[in-house]
Image (tube, rainbow, N blue to C red):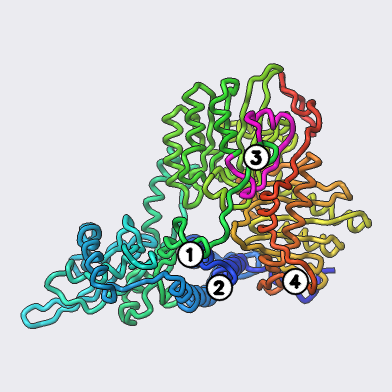
């Protein structure tokens, strides 16, 4: 029975508030003195960059809803105005806590460890002379002072740029004229300047403070009354009507230029700035007091991320770790031979992503490979993935890349890669109108002695070697003919005009994914009602979809035990009597960003296991091309359940448990219970070479296909 005390909206947590609670868990890692100091600095910077994106996208979206007078309610029944008011209080508290962490925790600890932040006026004579030379030779030539007066309107301050607003006085005919001016801190120079020859090796100047000290030189004939750092955050969503553009790539490029000048949504300014100056800026930017954030610390937290660059101070960091080669590939040069023998599951970053790069490189250079088809969502700046595809095309192979141009904040990278791929002869497509291509898929078609064979890599994360070292994800390699045929069918859908066709193994959004998950949950519900084994365990980044949440509530009421690992947003309320008392939700925030998605349904004693590219969110189910696949190999199923899922559900060091009110508490450790730190256990597992891998399960399943097999459901 559903509790009568809860109306429908009270059954859900607010999406935006839940995201802020996730960012609080990130900030908690910066506050945690048991973490190495430079790791705490890293989490401090991540908290800031997360908040930036939250304002650029989520807060900007709410403001647009409010301005358009669109009356829509969120899952928890709030209007955009109600949500914004609630968020504003929480965001201000979070910013205060964020900078309190810097002032009261990190800055003193860094000073004790030999990291010092100076002002020009307090430098030694030698360092001051160096700073002056650096300013006049490297900095001043690129500065552009911008006056504000009737002839010079307020300049278009770029999104998230650090700026100085300067109050100055001009003496004319015995009268004093008060003026304002803007100076942007150059993006081309490091925001944190390392001073040479210091005893500790870690003495720094903030670039903005250095510019402020020498401001009089770029405003000759004036008297500087004061300067204050400020930063404007703008709406960074792209607005493109895909059905009404002739060239999608050109349209995205145009919108990217507009992004830097979108409507302002937040003003951050030094807390010492005079009230009248703050009011003037708010008026110019069309913002209100609730959009104002007074900052007592580095105006952009990312400035101090430079402290973490390099190999210095190993005692202030986590022990170094480099992912190992998976046992299945050790001592084997022929990647295709390994995959032909048996499926392989990799757990990144514990097992190296280099095998995925090697898979592509081997495919590019192998004369027996006829074609490569790949989706690209976020590839970053590493050229190796793109380079392999270009090299394959130059060698005469058929190469197709489905590039998602609207991968948020990676659009510029993807546009650049798309142009280079096209110039190299790669067939570049941008997917389906109205849908983001979020699936992570690479298909290699190879001519072998007994016919054509398809080799496949499917992942939960992006083809990005850089982030693969800090994100936890799953990679799956297979040569199963039915998987390969499904991959070929999907690529035909993405690059051509074909209609979606039901597949052998793939579960594809927006066509089947949502219903597949709902059906699996309902099956567990029915099994519980009939006293058959029933359990759900799932890991994802976000849980937002209302229908899925309702199905989980119904499963809980039927007695199904539900364990959810949800790193970020979770709109489900666990532990409510009569509704969700059988549901537990935990979030792990640790050294590596938890990013893998997999779902386990007991299925009456025959577990149904899926890995997927998408979360349980409306956008993943309905607005994106996502792929989920079943894991059928016995040894890989055992590994997913026993080695990965069980360990993460037992974590009592970095796991936090979601409470019914939306707050999180650290997982309690019972008396005499051993410490379970999941990421540390995974590192130990690969370091001790105790990983298991799949064993061959018969050659028949990887028999090369000479003709298209009949479809079976």
Dot 1 falls on a residue whose secondary structure is: helix
Label 1 close to label 3 by CB (< 8 Å): no
Which residue is at the front of the view, 112 or 621? Answer: 112
Residue where numbered disc 2 is placed: 31
Residue where numbered disc 3 is placed: 458
Residue 396 makes an appearance in the image = yes
Q: Where does residue 228 sit, x and y in percent of width and height?
A: 31, 74
Apparent side of residue 674 relative to residue 295 in the rendered image (left or right): right
Residue where numbered disc 4 is placed: 669
Which residue is at the front of the view, 296 or 675? Answer: 675
Label 2 close to label 3 by CB (< 8 Å): no
Front of the two marks 1 and 3 = 1
Dot 3 falls on a residue whose secondary structure is: strand
Q: What numbered label is drawn on residue 182?
A: none
| Residue depicted at x 22% and y 79% | 225
Q: Mark 2 or mark 4, which has the lower sequence index?
A: 2
- Region rendered in magenta: 331-354
The answer for how far apart the CA atoms under marks 2 and 3 are is 37 Å
Residue where numbered disc 1 is placed: 45
Q: Which quadrant does the N terminus fall into?
A: bottom right
């Amino acid at each position: 029975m559903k509790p009568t005390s809860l109306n429908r909206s009270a059954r859900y947590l607010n999406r935006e508030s839940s995201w802020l609670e996730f960012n609080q868990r990130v900030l908690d890692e910066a506050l945690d003195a048991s973490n190495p100091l430079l790791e705490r600095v890293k989490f401090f910077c991540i908290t800031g960059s997360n908040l930036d994106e939250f304002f650029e996208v989520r807060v900007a979206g709410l403001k647009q809803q409010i301005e358009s007078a669109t009356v829509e309610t969120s899952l928890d029944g709030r209007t955009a105005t109600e949500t914004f008011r609630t968020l504003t209080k929480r965001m201000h508290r979070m910013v205060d806590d964020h900078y309190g962490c810097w002032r009261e925790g990190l800055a003193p600890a860094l000073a004790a460890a030999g990291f010092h932040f100076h002002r020009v006026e307090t430098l030694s004579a030698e360092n001051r002379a160096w700073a002056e030379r650096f300013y006049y030779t490297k900095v001043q030539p690129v500065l552009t002072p911008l006056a504000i007066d009737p002839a010079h309107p307020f300049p278009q301050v770029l999104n998230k740029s650090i700026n100085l607003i300067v109050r100055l006085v001009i003496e004319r005919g015995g009268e004093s004229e008060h003026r304002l001016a803007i100076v942007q801190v150059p993006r081309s120079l490091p925001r944190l300047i390392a001073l040479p020859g210091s005893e500790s090796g870690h003495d720094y100047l903030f670039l903005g403070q250095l510019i402020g000290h020498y401001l009089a030189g770029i405003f000759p004939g004036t008297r500087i009354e004061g300067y204050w750092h400020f930063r404007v955050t703008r709406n960074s969503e792209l607005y493109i009507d895909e059905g009404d553009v002739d060239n999608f790539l050109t349209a995205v490029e145009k919108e990217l230029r507009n992004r830097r000048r979108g409507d302002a949504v937040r003003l951050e300014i030094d807390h010492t700035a005079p009230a009248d100056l703050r009011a003037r800026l708010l008026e110019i930017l069309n913002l209100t007091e609730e959009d104002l954030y007074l900052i007592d610390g580095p105006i952009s937290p990312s400035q101090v991320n430079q402290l973490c660059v390099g190999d210095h101070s190993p005692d202030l960091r986590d022990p170094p770790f480099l992912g190992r080669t998976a046992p299945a590939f050790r001592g084997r040069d022929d990647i295709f031979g390994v995959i032909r023998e048996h499926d392989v599951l990799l757990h990144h970053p514990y097992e190296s992503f280099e095998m995925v790069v090697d898979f592509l490189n081997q495919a590019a250079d192998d004369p027996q490979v006829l074609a490569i088809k790949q989706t690209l969502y976020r590839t970053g700046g590493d050229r190796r993935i793109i380079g392999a595809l270009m090299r394959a095309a130059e060698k005469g192979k058929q190469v197709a890349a489905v590039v998602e141009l609207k991968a948020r904040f990676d659009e510029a990278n993807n546009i650049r890669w798309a142009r280079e791929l096209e110039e190299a002869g790669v067939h570049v497509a941008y997917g389906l109108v109205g849908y983001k291509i979020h699936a992570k898929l690479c298909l290699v078609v190879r001519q072998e002695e007994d016919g054509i064979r398809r080799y496949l890599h499917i992942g939960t994360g992006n083809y990005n070697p850089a982030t693969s070292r800090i994100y936890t994800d799953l990679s799956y390699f297979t040569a199963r003919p039915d998987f390969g045929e499904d991959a070929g069918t999907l690529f035909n859908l993405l690059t051509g005009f074909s209609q979606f066709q039901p597949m052998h193994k793939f579960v594809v959004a927006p066509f089947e994914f949502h219903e597949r998950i709902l059906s699996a949950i309902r099956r567990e519900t029915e099994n519980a009602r009939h006293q058959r084994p029933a359990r759900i365990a799932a890991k994802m980044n976000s849980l937002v979809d209302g229908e899925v949440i309702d199905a989980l509530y119904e499963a809980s009421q039927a007695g199904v035990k539900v364990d959810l690992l949800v790193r970020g947003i979770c709109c489900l309320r666990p532990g409510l009597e009569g509704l969700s008392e059988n549901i537990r939700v935990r979030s792990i925030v640790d050294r590596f960003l938890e990013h893998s998605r997999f779902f386990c349904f007991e299925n009456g004693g025959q577990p149904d296991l899926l890995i997927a590219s998408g979360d349980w969110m409306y956008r993943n189910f309905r607005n994106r091309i996502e792929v989920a696949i079943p894991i059928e190999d016995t040894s890989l199923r055992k590994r997913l359940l026993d080695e990965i899922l069980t360990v993460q559900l037992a974590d009592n060091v970095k796991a936090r448990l979601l409470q019914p009110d939306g707050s999180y508490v650290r997982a309690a450790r019972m008396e005499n219970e051993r410490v379970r730190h999941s990421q540390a256990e995974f590192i130990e597992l690969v370091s001790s070479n105790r990983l298991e891998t799949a064993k061959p399960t018969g050659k028949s399943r990887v028999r090369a296909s000479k003709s298209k097999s009949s479809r079976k459901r």
